[in-house]
Image: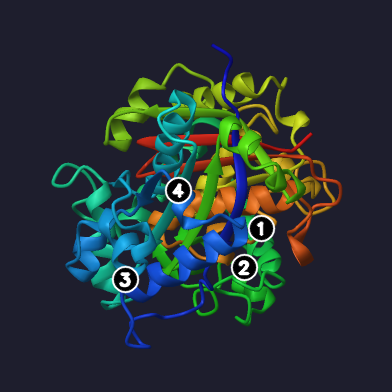
Amino acid sequence: MAAVTTWVAGGFQTDFARNWARAGHGFAELFAEVTTGTLDAAGIDPADIGVIHVGNAFGQLFTGQGQLGGMPATVDERLWGIPATRHEAACASGGTAILAAMADLESGRYDAALVLGAELERTVPGDRAAGHLGAAAWVGHEGQQAKFMWPYMFSALADEYDKRYGLDERHLRAIGRLNFDNARVNPNAQTRNWTFTDASFTDDDAANPPVEGRLRRNDCSQVTDGAAGVVLVGDRYLAAHPGLARRPLARILGWGHATVGLSLDQKLRRSADDPYVLPHVRRAVLDAFGRAGIGGVDDVDGIETHDCFTMSQYAAIDHFGITAPGESWKAVESGELAIGGRIPMNPSGGLIGGGHPVGATGVRMLVDAYRQVTGQAGPYQVPGARTFATLNIGGSTTTTVSLVVGAAL
């Protein structure tokens, strides 16, 4: 049987700067906006949707609301009766929702899928929010001494890089600056109107206070509300709806997916003799490249990667193969990660600049990759982009999902 292509028919993102709780809104209003926006962007009749997949990591913790697979039909009764599933893989929840939808299309079970990612995190004070997010670590076994679990964990990853290869924290600060600068022109970015000075990207304790270990405030993505959505269709749907081919379309050319144990220490011990600090992340990227039929990172025009912290982007640089292992600093210093450079990284502003509503992030990355390869990214468009890669991670890279997205032929 011939392989089925997964086509991206359209995507939508809410404004990640909005505080939904402050406006008196909850998941119903968030899902109503993203569901309608996504279907409209794709030009798809809701009656054509065969299946729904929802990425959400922490709904019960932040709002008390679970069973979010039922929320699309709750807010849009045109979706009543359509099978729907919620997926949880921490910050990779959106990525796993996409993979499940792709599998449904490739199997022939359904022809069109609605994929939504959503998270509300600004319902509680910041310290409590950090505690909720810590549920994605190995609870009771790591990070017990940390006030903020995830800055602590990614500072530990920085320590490991320093031990193996050396690490200059100025390169972490430069990654933060790049992503905040890119976010300024993204109309949906959480930090687009924030104000910084040069000192905001230094070790100045007033302008850029320490958070945990090596990481400072502007090394960290922010607590964020928001949602993103895509409509994915298979070849059979495209053939039955020839008018869709006249709309901007993209193809998911390749994918990689790896899951390992929860503990960061376990990951680092297992990789002690490997040139890559996180070899399973490298494998997921190479799987995506291989399935896409491309030779390596120089065959993509840009990357949307998971910069929950500057250190996670620093690690992504060498794991994508932009540099040799341990030499990510070379790409930071050279300017090749900027729009117009060799491999633009996070032209949207990523998670640090754009915002990180956990369950939405993997879907938002696909939305931005789709926009880039169809020439719809507006002020942060990478000129001539035809192929984009994504990397979505959950926990300390416990779950890794990578995609390669290409323009329609």
- Mark 1 neighbour class, 10 Å CA radius: few under 14, some 14 to 19, many 20 or more: some
Q: Position of residue 143 (x, y in %)?
A: 24, 49
Residue placed under numbered mark 3 in the picture: 27
Q: Secondary structure at mark 2?
A: helix
Q: Which color mode does the image show?
A: rainbow
Q: Quadrant of the N terminus?
A: top right
Residue placed under numbered mark 1 in the picture: 174
The span from disc 3 to disc 1 (Cα, nearest Å) is 35 Å
Is tag 3's residue or tag 1's residue first in the polypeptide sequence?
3
The span from disc 2 to disc 3 (Cα, nearest Å) is 35 Å
Q: Position of residue 45 (x, y in %)?
A: 52, 56
One can see residue 252 in this view: yes
Residue 201 badge: 2
Residue 347 badge: none
The span from disc 3 to disc 4 (Cα, nearest Å) is 21 Å
Q: How many marks?
A: 4
Residue placed under numbered mark 4 in the picture: 49
Q: Secondary structure at mark 3?
A: helix
Q: Position of residue 130 (x, y in %)?
A: 29, 64
Q: Quadrant of the C terminus?
A: top right
Identify the residue shown where x is 35% and y is 54%.
150
Name the amino acid, label 2: Phe
Is tag 2's residue or tag 3's residue first in the polypeptide sequence?
3
- Mark 2 neighbour class, 10 Å CA radius: few under 14, some 14 to 19, many 20 or more: many
